[in-house]
Amino acid sequence: MSAAMSAPARPASPGDVVALQYGNAYRMLGVPLIILGAVVALTVAISVIVLRAGGDLGRADFNASVLYSVLGYTVAIGVQNVSSSFPFALALGSTRRTFVLGNLVTALAQSLLVAVLSVALLGVEVATRGWFIGASAFGSVLLGDGDPLVLGGVVFATMLGALSVGGVFGACWIRFGARGPLVLSLGAAVVVVLLLLPQIVGLAAAFRPWWIAVGIAALIGLATVGEYLFLRRASVR
Amino acid sequence: MTASAIRLTGVSRRFGRTTALDDVTAEVPAGVVCGLLGRNGAGKTTLMSILAGHDRPSAGTVEVLGSDPFEHADVMGSISLIRDNQRYPEDFKLKHVLRVVPRFHERWDAELAAELIDAFRLPSRTTVKKMSRGQQSGLGIVIGLASRAPLTVFDEPYLGLDATARRVFADRLLAARLDDAAARTIVLSTHLIDEMEQLLDHVVVLDGGRLVRTGTTEEVTAGAHSLSGAAAAVERVAAGRTPLSSHRVGGLLSLVFAGEAPAGLAEEAAAAGVQVAPVGLQELVAAFGAGDGAEVRAEREGAAA
């Protein structure tokens, strides 16, 4: 039997990869919302205990649990978005380049969503005067002291950094197996110890806040390029 | 227009010191169902990965739907390859898969997908990674068949499937083959060759990473014959010829030879009480896999000389 060759189908787009990553909305939207809600609940509970014990909530202004709580989960999402979504995306006809671009758009969208959610919760916190008891989860000094732009920026950059780092580790695992992430971690640790630590005193003296933004941007850029370079040569498992 | 959907020229793939594919040259016409056959470790999955653009050959050239598939967006967008051990996002259930896959396959047939899901009795509440082996195979078949991708590749689609599910797959595969509007080329690997033989238009047989036979199913099976009967009589009739495989049960012996039966063999065999018979595809593939490959190499070198 012979036949004319079928016309090519539409190539996969980064938007298709984003749809894949948000295929289970609960994982991407529901869980972060639950985590942030849990942070509010715990902050209120701890604040009540402190107040009943005669303490002062002013010292809780350095509460940055919003970042810590969602950070680990976000890194895990970053890893999973590569380690298990990459083989499935290729099975469905995506190229590696399209997958990495789609994953970058996903990371930007996810970071923006969590940042907007945090700012919205800050609005509720302000409107309720600290969840009715003066507690501060989103408006703490470390998170901008109630400035929504600072809070949004910090959360956005942190989430994007976490997703990018998770993504590069996931890609490293796909490319080199279990030893890949170990070697990558050791390599990163060596760079920090040998290059940055000897300069730490001088760096601290000259430190400017914008360095953080530049550092995170560099980290995200390196991680994205690294993710593509690892996946470019990776065999699909 | 008749065209090749797949064209392989001297394709080799090495992983360190292991050679998974060794100088494979073959063509698969468009619009056929092609069986990729051979023992475990023959190189079938490696070849499928290369066809789908999931991997690159160490040497040689690959053309799929007219171009090298690796990182070629148009070609890769026209291919569906669900592996026998396909990884899905960890928390995906059936509904998540069905939400995502049509985004990638514009010709997605939702009606067919629903029909197959019902026929395979795929669970909706279980995550894909917790589905049974047969259910995961069923899901792979749903994605592959309903994708209507111009090149659809199935890696061991029968793994764990019960008899009813295998019949459903065979029926739907036949329907897909007859679907002229799609003009699909389907490549599948399987060990259940007897069950699939009637559906295969074309076969590619690998052993130890080397191509041992390719062509239409009829061409390939016509290129071998067997002798069977009392061991002594068979050995006498076969004297001086090297079989691809031999199978002895008690005093009976069956030998499989490459090539058509030589002139005069039928008469000589009949006189000795030995039966000369054509070889089925499964028997032939088993014969190629039975030896250490020496016969195949000798035959290839002889043919090249």
Image (cartoon, coloured by chain):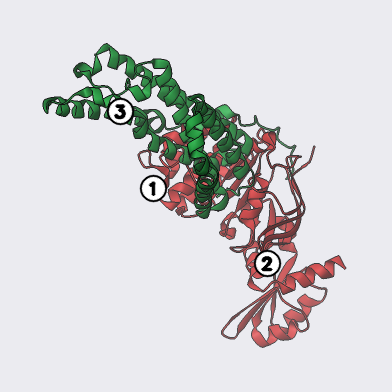
Single out the mark in the foreground, 3 or 2: 3
> Tag 3, which secondary structure?
loop
- Of all chains, the one bearing label 2 is B
Position above or below: B1 against A44: below
> Tag 2, which secondary structure?
loop
The picture places residue B120, in percent across and down from the top left corner, at: 44, 44
Name the residue beneath numbered marker 1: B130
Name the residue beneath numbered marker 3: A63
Name the residue beneath numbered marker 2: B279
Say if residue A134 shows up in the picture: yes
Position above or below: B90 against A123: below
Say if residue B86 shows up in the picture: no
Q: Quadrant of the C terminus of chain B?
A: bottom right
Confirm whether circles 3 and 2 share one chain: no
Q: What residue type is labelled 2?
A: Val
The front one of B172 and B303 is B303
> Tag 1, which secondary structure?
helix
- Of all chains, the one bearing label 1 is B
Q: Distance between the residues labelled 3 and 1?
A: 40 Å
Q: In which quarter of the image is residue A148?
A: top left
Which residue occupies the extreme right position in the image?
B305
